[in-house]
Image: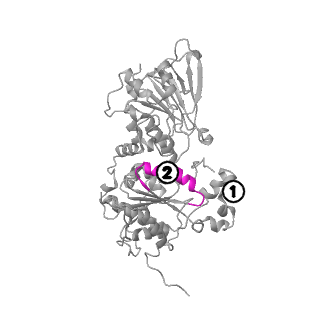
Protein backbone atom coordinates (compact mmCIF):
# COMPACT_ATOMS: atom_id res chain seq x y z
CA UNK A 1 0.00 0.00 0.00
CA UNK A 2 1.43 3.36 -0.96
CA UNK A 3 2.32 5.62 1.96
CA UNK A 4 0.95 9.15 2.13
CA UNK A 5 3.54 11.81 1.23
CA UNK A 6 5.27 13.49 4.15
CA UNK A 7 5.35 17.26 4.65
CA UNK A 8 8.21 19.23 3.15
CA UNK A 9 9.85 19.58 6.58
CA UNK A 10 9.81 15.85 7.20
CA UNK A 11 11.09 15.11 3.71
CA UNK A 12 14.31 17.07 4.36
CA UNK A 13 17.49 15.00 4.35
CA UNK A 14 20.41 14.80 6.72
CA UNK A 15 22.26 16.96 4.20
CA UNK A 16 19.67 19.71 4.22
CA UNK A 17 19.23 19.54 7.94
CA UNK A 18 22.90 20.50 8.02
CA UNK A 19 21.97 23.41 5.79
CA UNK A 20 19.35 24.42 8.34
CA UNK A 21 22.13 24.39 10.93
CA UNK A 22 24.06 26.68 8.59
CA UNK A 23 21.07 29.03 8.57
CA UNK A 24 21.13 29.00 12.37
CA UNK A 25 24.79 30.03 12.32
CA UNK A 26 23.84 32.84 9.97
CA UNK A 27 20.92 34.07 12.09
CA UNK A 28 23.08 34.06 15.22
CA UNK A 29 25.95 35.96 13.63
CA UNK A 30 23.76 38.43 11.76
CA UNK A 31 22.10 39.40 14.97
CA UNK A 32 25.89 40.58 15.80
CA UNK A 33 72.89 51.52 -15.46
CA UNK A 34 70.00 51.05 -17.40
CA UNK A 35 68.04 52.43 -14.49
CA UNK A 36 65.80 49.98 -12.73
CA UNK A 37 62.83 52.35 -12.79
CA UNK A 38 61.95 51.21 -16.31
CA UNK A 39 60.58 48.09 -14.59
CA UNK A 40 58.53 50.19 -12.20
CA UNK A 41 54.78 50.53 -12.69
CA UNK A 42 53.38 53.96 -13.33
CA UNK A 43 51.09 54.27 -10.29
CA UNK A 44 52.45 55.91 -7.09
CA UNK A 45 54.27 53.68 -4.59
CA UNK A 46 56.03 54.04 -1.27
CA UNK A 47 59.63 55.13 -1.27
CA UNK A 48 62.14 52.45 -2.17
CA UNK A 49 64.41 50.69 0.27
CA UNK A 50 67.36 53.02 0.87
CA UNK A 51 68.83 51.73 4.10
CA UNK A 52 70.88 48.53 3.86
CA UNK A 53 70.23 47.80 7.52
CA UNK A 54 66.50 47.82 6.86
CA UNK A 55 66.96 45.51 3.88
CA UNK A 56 68.97 43.14 6.07
CA UNK A 57 66.15 42.97 8.61
CA UNK A 58 63.52 42.31 5.96
CA UNK A 59 65.54 39.48 4.44
CA UNK A 60 66.64 37.97 7.77
CA UNK A 61 63.00 37.53 8.71
CA UNK A 62 62.78 34.74 6.11
CA UNK A 63 65.28 32.57 8.01
CA UNK A 64 65.81 31.35 11.55
CA UNK A 65 68.40 29.67 13.75
CA UNK A 66 71.66 28.61 12.10
CA UNK A 67 70.49 29.77 8.68
CA UNK A 68 69.97 33.29 9.98
CA UNK A 69 73.44 33.27 11.57
CA UNK A 70 74.95 32.07 8.29
CA UNK A 71 73.17 34.85 6.40
CA UNK A 72 74.62 37.46 8.73
CA UNK A 73 78.12 36.00 8.36
CA UNK A 74 78.28 35.21 4.65
CA UNK A 75 75.43 37.18 3.10
CA UNK A 76 73.78 34.00 1.80
CA UNK A 77 71.88 31.08 3.40
CA UNK A 78 69.05 28.65 2.70
CA UNK A 79 66.09 27.18 4.56
CA UNK A 80 64.89 23.72 3.60
CA UNK A 81 62.00 21.56 4.81
CA UNK A 82 59.82 18.77 3.43
CA UNK A 83 57.68 21.17 1.39
CA UNK A 84 60.00 23.83 0.05
CA UNK A 85 63.45 25.40 -0.16
CA UNK A 86 64.14 29.12 0.23
CA UNK A 87 67.55 30.74 -0.36
CA UNK A 88 68.24 34.33 0.74
CA UNK A 89 70.99 36.82 -0.07
CA UNK A 90 71.29 40.13 1.77
CA UNK A 91 74.19 41.23 -0.41
CA UNK A 92 74.19 42.22 -4.10
CA UNK A 93 73.45 39.43 -6.57
CA UNK A 94 73.46 39.10 -10.35
CA UNK A 95 70.75 37.05 -12.03
CA UNK A 96 71.17 35.95 -15.63
CA UNK A 97 67.56 35.40 -16.66
CA UNK A 98 68.59 33.78 -19.97
CA UNK A 99 69.96 30.77 -18.04
CA UNK A 100 68.29 31.41 -14.65
CA UNK A 101 71.67 31.48 -12.94
CA UNK A 102 72.03 33.41 -9.69
CA UNK A 103 75.52 34.69 -8.86
CA UNK A 104 75.41 34.85 -5.06
CA UNK A 105 77.83 36.63 -2.68
CA UNK A 106 80.69 34.89 -0.95
CA UNK A 107 83.19 35.70 1.78
CA UNK A 108 86.87 36.26 1.06
CA UNK A 109 88.73 32.98 0.77
CA UNK A 110 85.51 31.00 0.44
CA UNK A 111 85.71 28.00 -1.89
CA UNK A 112 83.43 27.95 -4.89
CA UNK A 113 80.03 26.34 -4.40
CA UNK A 114 77.11 25.49 -6.65
CA UNK A 115 73.58 24.34 -5.96
CA UNK A 116 70.45 23.78 -7.99
CA UNK A 117 66.93 24.29 -6.66
CA UNK A 118 63.38 24.40 -7.99
CA UNK A 119 61.50 27.45 -6.66
CA UNK A 120 58.05 25.91 -6.18
CA UNK A 121 56.39 25.12 -2.84
CA UNK A 122 55.63 21.43 -3.35
CA UNK A 123 59.06 19.85 -3.07
CA UNK A 124 57.64 16.55 -1.83
CA UNK A 125 55.59 15.96 -5.01
CA UNK A 126 57.67 14.51 -7.85
CA UNK A 127 54.93 15.04 -10.44
CA UNK A 128 54.65 18.73 -9.66
CA UNK A 129 58.39 19.31 -9.46
CA UNK A 130 58.96 17.67 -12.84
CA UNK A 131 57.12 20.67 -14.30
CA UNK A 132 59.39 23.21 -12.58
CA UNK A 133 62.58 24.52 -14.21
CA UNK A 134 65.64 24.52 -11.93
CA UNK A 135 67.53 27.63 -10.87
CA UNK A 136 71.31 27.38 -10.53
CA UNK A 137 73.00 29.29 -7.71
CA UNK A 138 76.75 29.91 -7.96
CA UNK A 139 78.91 31.15 -5.09
CA UNK A 140 82.58 31.96 -4.84
CA UNK A 141 85.11 31.62 -7.61
CA UNK A 142 83.23 29.02 -9.62
CA UNK A 143 82.92 31.38 -12.55
CA UNK A 144 83.32 35.11 -13.11
CA UNK A 145 79.87 36.77 -12.99
CA UNK A 146 78.72 38.59 -16.15
CA UNK A 147 78.36 42.36 -16.30
CA UNK A 148 75.07 43.95 -15.25
CA UNK A 149 72.63 45.00 -17.97
CA UNK A 150 69.91 46.28 -15.64
CA UNK A 151 70.39 47.67 -12.15
CA UNK A 152 67.58 47.51 -9.62
CA UNK A 153 67.41 49.16 -6.21
CA UNK A 154 64.96 46.67 -4.70
CA UNK A 155 65.55 42.94 -4.01
CA UNK A 156 64.37 40.18 -6.33
CA UNK A 157 62.07 37.27 -5.48
CA UNK A 158 62.33 34.28 -7.82
CA UNK A 159 59.53 31.70 -7.99
CA UNK A 160 57.93 29.34 -10.50
CA UNK A 161 54.37 28.98 -11.79
CA UNK A 162 55.19 25.72 -13.54
CA UNK A 163 53.63 23.26 -11.08
CA UNK A 164 50.02 22.14 -10.99
CA UNK A 165 47.22 24.24 -12.50
CA UNK A 166 43.78 24.85 -11.02
CA UNK A 167 42.37 27.12 -8.32
CA UNK A 168 43.46 25.00 -5.35
CA UNK A 169 47.08 24.61 -6.43
CA UNK A 170 47.41 28.23 -7.57
CA UNK A 171 46.37 29.46 -4.12
CA UNK A 172 48.01 26.69 -2.13
CA UNK A 173 51.44 26.62 -3.79
CA UNK A 174 51.79 30.09 -5.31
CA UNK A 175 49.51 32.82 -3.94
CA UNK A 176 49.57 32.02 -0.20
CA UNK A 177 53.34 31.24 -0.21
CA UNK A 178 53.90 34.48 -2.14
CA UNK A 179 51.98 36.42 0.51
CA UNK A 180 53.85 34.62 3.30
CA UNK A 181 57.26 35.33 1.81
CA UNK A 182 56.86 38.88 0.52
CA UNK A 183 54.12 40.77 2.37
CA UNK A 184 56.56 42.36 4.82
CA UNK A 185 58.56 43.89 1.93
CA UNK A 186 55.72 46.41 1.57
CA UNK A 187 55.67 46.13 -2.24
CA UNK A 188 59.34 47.15 -2.58
CA UNK A 189 60.62 44.12 -4.47
CA UNK A 190 60.71 42.73 -7.99
CA UNK A 191 59.27 39.35 -9.03
CA UNK A 192 61.09 37.08 -11.45
CA UNK A 193 58.66 34.33 -12.52
CA UNK A 194 60.12 31.20 -14.08
CA UNK A 195 57.96 28.79 -16.10
CA UNK A 196 55.87 31.89 -16.68
CA UNK A 197 52.17 31.15 -17.17
CA UNK A 198 50.40 34.23 -18.56
CA UNK A 199 46.99 32.87 -17.53
CA UNK A 200 48.02 32.71 -13.86
CA UNK A 201 49.77 36.07 -13.83
CA UNK A 202 46.81 37.75 -15.52
CA UNK A 203 44.28 35.96 -13.31
CA UNK A 204 45.96 37.15 -10.11
CA UNK A 205 47.18 40.53 -11.33
CA UNK A 206 45.37 42.36 -8.51
CA UNK A 207 47.14 40.21 -5.91
CA UNK A 208 50.57 40.40 -7.54
CA UNK A 209 50.37 44.18 -7.96
CA UNK A 210 49.52 44.55 -4.26
CA UNK A 211 52.67 42.64 -3.34
CA UNK A 212 55.06 44.33 -5.78
CA UNK A 213 55.11 47.83 -7.24
CA UNK A 214 57.21 46.64 -10.17
CA UNK A 215 56.45 44.85 -13.40
CA UNK A 216 56.87 41.10 -13.28
CA UNK A 217 60.02 39.93 -15.08
CA UNK A 218 59.43 37.02 -17.43
CA UNK A 219 62.82 35.38 -18.14
CA UNK A 220 61.55 33.91 -21.41
CA UNK A 221 61.03 37.41 -22.77
CA UNK A 222 63.93 39.19 -21.08
CA UNK A 223 67.14 37.19 -21.18
CA UNK A 224 69.53 39.67 -19.60
CA UNK A 225 71.70 40.11 -16.54
CA UNK A 226 69.84 41.89 -13.73
CA UNK A 227 71.60 43.18 -10.63
CA UNK A 228 69.81 43.47 -7.28
CA UNK A 229 70.83 44.55 -3.75
CA UNK A 230 69.51 41.23 -2.43
CA UNK A 231 67.41 38.26 -3.50
CA UNK A 232 65.09 35.47 -2.41
CA UNK A 233 64.82 32.26 -4.44
CA UNK A 234 61.80 30.10 -3.57
CA UNK A 235 58.71 30.65 -1.41
CA UNK A 236 57.80 29.59 2.12
CA UNK A 237 54.96 27.09 2.66
CA UNK A 238 53.31 26.18 5.96
CA UNK A 239 50.36 23.89 5.25
CA UNK A 240 47.40 23.38 2.92
CA UNK A 241 45.46 26.67 2.66
CA UNK A 242 46.97 27.63 6.02
CA UNK A 243 49.45 29.95 7.69
CA UNK A 244 51.15 29.13 10.99
CA UNK A 245 51.86 32.35 12.89
CA UNK A 246 54.68 30.71 14.88
CA UNK A 247 56.63 29.40 11.88
CA UNK A 248 59.12 31.50 9.92
CA UNK A 249 58.31 34.05 8.62
CA UNK A 250 56.32 34.71 11.80
CA UNK A 251 53.44 37.10 12.36
CA UNK A 252 50.80 36.80 9.64
CA UNK A 253 47.74 34.53 9.84
CA UNK A 254 45.07 33.34 7.40
CA UNK A 255 42.85 36.13 8.69
CA UNK A 256 45.57 38.58 7.63
CA UNK A 257 45.69 36.87 4.25
CA UNK A 258 41.92 37.20 3.85
CA UNK A 259 42.15 40.91 4.71
CA UNK A 260 44.87 41.22 2.08
CA UNK A 261 42.52 39.61 -0.47
CA UNK A 262 39.76 42.04 0.49
CA UNK A 263 42.16 44.94 -0.04
CA UNK A 264 43.34 43.52 -3.37
CA UNK A 265 39.85 42.94 -4.78
CA UNK A 266 38.12 45.82 -3.00
CA UNK A 267 35.81 43.46 -1.11
CA UNK A 268 33.70 45.27 1.48
CA UNK A 269 32.47 42.58 3.86
CA UNK A 270 34.79 41.33 6.59
CA UNK A 271 32.22 39.71 8.88
CA UNK A 272 28.91 38.02 8.15
CA UNK A 273 27.09 40.49 10.40
CA UNK A 274 27.80 43.20 7.79
CA UNK A 275 25.54 41.53 5.19
CA UNK A 276 22.20 43.30 4.83
CA UNK A 277 20.03 41.02 2.69
CA UNK A 278 16.71 39.66 3.98
CA UNK A 279 17.47 36.10 2.91
CA UNK A 280 20.99 34.73 3.49
CA UNK A 281 22.85 33.91 0.29
CA UNK A 282 23.90 30.31 -0.33
CA UNK A 283 26.35 29.42 -3.10
CA UNK A 284 26.14 25.89 -4.47
CA UNK A 285 29.43 24.99 -6.16
CA UNK A 286 28.33 23.11 -9.26
CA UNK A 287 30.60 20.61 -10.98
CA UNK A 288 29.96 19.38 -14.51
CA UNK A 289 32.31 16.40 -14.80
CA UNK A 290 33.35 14.38 -11.77
CA UNK A 291 31.80 14.72 -8.31
CA UNK A 292 28.74 16.40 -9.80
CA UNK A 293 25.36 16.67 -8.11
CA UNK A 294 23.04 14.61 -10.30
CA UNK A 295 19.89 15.99 -8.64
CA UNK A 296 21.08 19.58 -8.41
CA UNK A 297 17.69 21.11 -9.23
CA UNK A 298 16.05 19.16 -6.41
CA UNK A 299 18.78 20.28 -4.03
CA UNK A 300 18.23 23.93 -4.91
CA UNK A 301 14.50 23.59 -4.38
CA UNK A 302 15.10 22.28 -0.86
CA UNK A 303 17.70 25.00 -0.13
CA UNK A 304 15.14 27.64 -1.07
CA UNK A 305 12.57 25.97 1.12
CA UNK A 306 15.00 26.26 4.04
CA UNK A 307 15.05 30.03 3.56
CA UNK A 308 18.13 30.68 1.41
CA UNK A 309 18.64 32.75 -1.71
CA UNK A 310 20.62 30.38 -3.95
CA UNK A 311 23.30 31.03 -6.55
CA UNK A 312 24.46 28.01 -8.54
CA UNK A 313 28.14 28.60 -9.36
CA UNK A 314 29.09 26.85 -12.59
CA UNK A 315 32.79 26.37 -13.52
CA UNK A 316 32.76 29.17 -16.10
CA UNK A 317 31.39 31.54 -13.47
CA UNK A 318 34.16 30.72 -10.98
CA UNK A 319 36.84 31.17 -13.65
CA UNK A 320 36.62 34.97 -13.34
CA UNK A 321 38.22 35.19 -9.93
CA UNK A 322 37.68 38.90 -9.37
CA UNK A 323 33.96 38.85 -10.21
CA UNK A 324 33.26 35.63 -8.33
CA UNK A 325 35.15 36.89 -5.25
CA UNK A 326 32.62 39.73 -4.94
CA UNK A 327 29.72 37.26 -4.96
CA UNK A 328 31.37 34.96 -2.43
CA UNK A 329 32.15 37.90 -0.18
CA UNK A 330 28.42 38.51 0.33
CA UNK A 331 27.68 34.82 0.91
CA UNK A 332 26.54 33.25 4.19
CA UNK A 333 26.88 29.57 3.25
CA UNK A 334 28.91 27.75 0.60
CA UNK A 335 27.98 24.17 -0.28
CA UNK A 336 29.98 21.90 -2.53
CA UNK A 337 31.49 18.50 -3.08
CA UNK A 338 35.20 18.10 -2.40
CA UNK A 339 37.10 19.80 -5.22
CA UNK A 340 39.05 22.84 -6.34
CA UNK A 341 36.00 25.12 -6.42
CA UNK A 342 35.88 25.11 -2.62
CA UNK A 343 39.14 27.08 -2.61
CA UNK A 344 36.89 30.14 -2.99
CA UNK A 345 36.21 29.93 0.76
CA UNK A 346 39.16 32.35 1.06
CA UNK A 347 36.71 35.08 -0.02
CA UNK A 348 33.94 34.19 2.46
CA UNK A 349 33.29 36.66 5.28
CA UNK A 350 34.27 35.59 8.76
CA UNK A 351 31.42 33.74 10.42
CA UNK A 352 30.15 32.19 7.19
CA UNK A 353 29.60 28.44 6.86
CA UNK A 354 31.26 25.88 4.60
CA UNK A 355 29.26 22.69 4.02
CA UNK A 356 31.50 20.14 2.32
CA UNK A 357 29.94 17.06 0.75
CA UNK A 358 32.38 14.22 1.39
CA UNK A 359 31.99 11.38 -1.08
CA UNK A 360 32.91 7.75 -0.66
CA UNK A 361 36.61 7.32 0.28
CA UNK A 362 37.24 11.08 0.19
CA UNK A 363 37.49 11.65 3.95
CA UNK A 364 41.25 12.26 4.05
CA UNK A 365 41.56 14.88 1.30
CA UNK A 366 38.31 16.55 2.35
CA UNK A 367 39.59 16.99 5.89
CA UNK A 368 43.16 18.00 5.08
CA UNK A 369 42.52 20.34 2.16
CA UNK A 370 39.36 22.14 3.32
CA UNK A 371 37.95 20.87 6.62
CA UNK A 372 41.00 21.58 8.76
CA UNK A 373 41.88 24.97 7.16
CA UNK A 374 38.32 26.41 7.36
CA UNK A 375 38.32 27.40 11.07
CA UNK A 376 41.64 29.20 10.60
CA UNK A 377 39.83 31.42 8.10
CA UNK A 378 37.19 32.30 10.67
CA UNK A 379 34.62 29.96 9.11
CA UNK A 380 32.18 27.44 10.56
CA UNK A 381 32.66 24.01 9.03
CA UNK A 382 30.01 21.32 8.53
CA UNK A 383 30.74 18.00 6.85
CA UNK A 384 28.13 15.88 5.11
CA UNK A 385 29.34 12.33 4.50
CA UNK A 386 27.40 10.64 1.75
CA UNK A 387 25.97 7.15 2.10
CA UNK A 388 27.00 4.54 -0.51
CA UNK A 389 23.49 4.82 -2.00
CA UNK A 390 24.14 8.49 -2.75
CA UNK A 391 27.24 7.70 -4.83
CA UNK A 392 27.02 6.94 -8.54
CA UNK A 393 29.63 4.22 -7.94
CA UNK A 394 27.07 1.85 -6.42
CA UNK A 395 25.10 1.58 -9.65
CA UNK A 396 28.31 1.09 -11.60
CA UNK A 397 29.96 -1.54 -9.41
CA UNK A 398 27.35 -2.90 -7.00
CA UNK A 399 27.39 -2.87 -3.21
CA UNK A 400 29.71 -5.88 -2.83
CA UNK A 401 32.46 -4.64 -5.16
CA UNK A 402 35.71 -3.56 -3.39
CA UNK A 403 35.22 0.00 -4.72
CA UNK A 404 32.19 0.22 -2.41
CA UNK A 405 32.90 -2.35 0.28
CA UNK A 406 36.67 -1.95 0.68
CA UNK A 407 38.03 1.44 -0.53
CA UNK A 408 41.32 0.79 1.31
CA UNK A 409 42.07 -2.07 -1.06
CA UNK A 410 41.63 0.27 -4.05
CA UNK A 411 43.92 2.85 -2.45
CA UNK A 412 46.50 0.12 -1.83
CA UNK A 413 46.73 -0.49 -5.58
CA UNK A 414 48.11 3.02 -6.09
CA UNK A 415 46.98 6.60 -6.48
CA UNK A 416 45.91 6.28 -10.12
CA UNK A 417 43.40 3.53 -9.23
CA UNK A 418 42.11 5.58 -6.29
CA UNK A 419 41.84 8.73 -8.39
CA UNK A 420 40.02 6.99 -11.24
CA UNK A 421 37.37 5.51 -8.95
CA UNK A 422 36.69 8.17 -6.35
CA UNK A 423 37.81 11.49 -7.89
CA UNK A 424 36.94 10.93 -11.55
CA UNK A 425 34.09 8.38 -11.80
CA UNK A 426 32.15 9.40 -8.69
CA UNK A 427 29.14 11.75 -8.71
CA UNK A 428 26.30 12.16 -6.22
CA UNK A 429 22.55 11.84 -6.01
CA UNK A 430 21.93 13.48 -2.64
CA UNK A 431 19.09 11.93 -0.63
CA UNK A 432 16.44 14.58 0.07
CA UNK A 433 13.67 12.43 1.51
CA UNK A 434 14.71 10.67 4.72
CA UNK A 435 16.14 10.72 8.26
CA UNK A 436 15.39 14.40 8.93
CA UNK A 437 14.28 14.21 12.58
CA UNK A 438 17.34 12.21 13.65
CA UNK A 439 19.77 14.63 12.02
CA UNK A 440 17.89 17.71 13.22
CA UNK A 441 18.45 16.48 16.78
CA UNK A 442 22.19 16.09 16.19
CA UNK A 443 22.33 19.39 14.32
CA UNK A 444 20.92 21.39 17.22
CA UNK A 445 23.62 19.98 19.50
CA UNK A 446 26.26 21.47 17.19
CA UNK A 447 24.75 24.94 17.51
CA UNK A 448 24.33 25.07 21.27
CA UNK A 449 25.07 28.65 22.19
CA UNK A 450 22.44 31.32 21.80
CA UNK A 451 23.34 34.96 20.98
CA UNK A 452 23.73 35.70 24.70
CA UNK A 453 26.36 33.00 25.04
CA UNK A 454 24.23 30.62 27.13
CA UNK A 455 23.66 26.96 26.46
CA UNK A 456 20.32 26.53 24.76
CA UNK A 457 18.17 24.64 22.30
CA UNK A 458 17.22 26.29 19.04
CA UNK A 459 13.72 25.44 17.81
CA UNK A 460 13.26 24.69 14.09
CA UNK A 461 12.94 27.77 11.91
CA UNK A 462 9.54 27.87 10.25
CA UNK A 463 10.09 30.86 7.96
CA UNK A 464 10.48 29.72 4.37
CA UNK A 465 9.79 26.06 5.07
CA UNK A 466 6.47 26.15 3.26
CA UNK A 467 7.94 27.11 -0.12
CA UNK A 468 6.59 25.42 -3.22
CA UNK A 469 9.94 25.09 -4.95
CA UNK A 470 9.11 27.40 -7.87
CA UNK A 471 12.04 29.35 -9.24
CA UNK A 472 10.10 32.30 -10.63
CA UNK A 473 11.19 34.67 -7.87
CA UNK A 474 14.82 34.82 -9.01
CA UNK A 475 16.30 33.13 -5.95
CA UNK A 476 17.56 30.26 -8.10
CA UNK A 477 20.27 31.92 -10.13
CA UNK A 478 22.52 30.58 -12.84
CA UNK A 479 25.04 33.37 -13.36
CA UNK A 480 26.07 34.20 -16.95
CA UNK A 481 29.38 32.96 -18.28
CA UNK A 482 32.37 35.07 -17.34
CA UNK A 483 35.06 32.97 -18.99
CA UNK A 484 35.50 29.80 -20.98
CA UNK A 485 38.05 28.37 -18.54
CA UNK A 486 36.90 25.15 -16.85
CA UNK A 487 37.78 24.91 -13.17
CA UNK A 488 36.42 21.38 -12.76
CA UNK A 489 39.91 20.26 -11.66
CA UNK A 490 39.98 16.86 -13.37
CA UNK A 491 43.15 17.44 -15.31
CA UNK A 492 45.77 19.06 -13.14
CA UNK A 493 46.94 16.53 -10.58
CA UNK A 494 44.56 17.72 -7.89
CA UNK A 495 45.02 15.69 -4.71
CA UNK A 496 48.12 14.05 -6.11
CA UNK A 497 49.56 12.99 -2.76
CA UNK A 498 46.82 11.30 -0.78
CA UNK A 499 47.55 9.39 2.40
CA UNK A 500 46.55 5.77 2.65
Q: Residue at x 53, y 53 (%)?
A: 367
**Of the numbered discs in the image, which one, if any, rests on residue 44?**
none
Q: Which residue, as the protein is rendered here, is positioned at the far front?
A: 455
Quarter of the image for residue 445 reads bottom left
Residue 19 in sight here: no
How many numbered marks are there? 2
Q: Residue at x 64, y 54 (%)?
A: 418
Vertically, is 453 above or below 167?
below
Quarter of the image for residue 250 reads top left
Residue 334 in sight here: yes
Vertically, is 329 above or below 208?
below
Q: Nearer the viewer, residue 19 or 221?
A: 19
Q: Secondary structure at mark 2?
A: loop
Circle 1 residue? 409
Circle 2 residue? 372
Q: Which residue, as the protein is rendered here, is positioned at the far top?
A: 109
Amino acid sequence: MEKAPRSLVLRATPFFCLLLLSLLYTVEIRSRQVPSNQWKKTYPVESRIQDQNHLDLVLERLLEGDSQILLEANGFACHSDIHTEVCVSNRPVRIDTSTMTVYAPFSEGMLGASRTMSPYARKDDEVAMARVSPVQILQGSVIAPPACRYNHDVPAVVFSTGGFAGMFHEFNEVIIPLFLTTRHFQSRLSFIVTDYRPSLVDKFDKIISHLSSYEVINPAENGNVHCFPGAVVGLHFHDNLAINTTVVPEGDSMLDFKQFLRDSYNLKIQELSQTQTEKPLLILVSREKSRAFLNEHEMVTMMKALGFRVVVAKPHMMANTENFAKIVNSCSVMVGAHGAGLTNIVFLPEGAVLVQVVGLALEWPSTHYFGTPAPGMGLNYIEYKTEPEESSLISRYGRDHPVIADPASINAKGYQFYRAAYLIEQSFNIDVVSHCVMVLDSSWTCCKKNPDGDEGYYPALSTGMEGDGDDDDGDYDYAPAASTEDDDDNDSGFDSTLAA
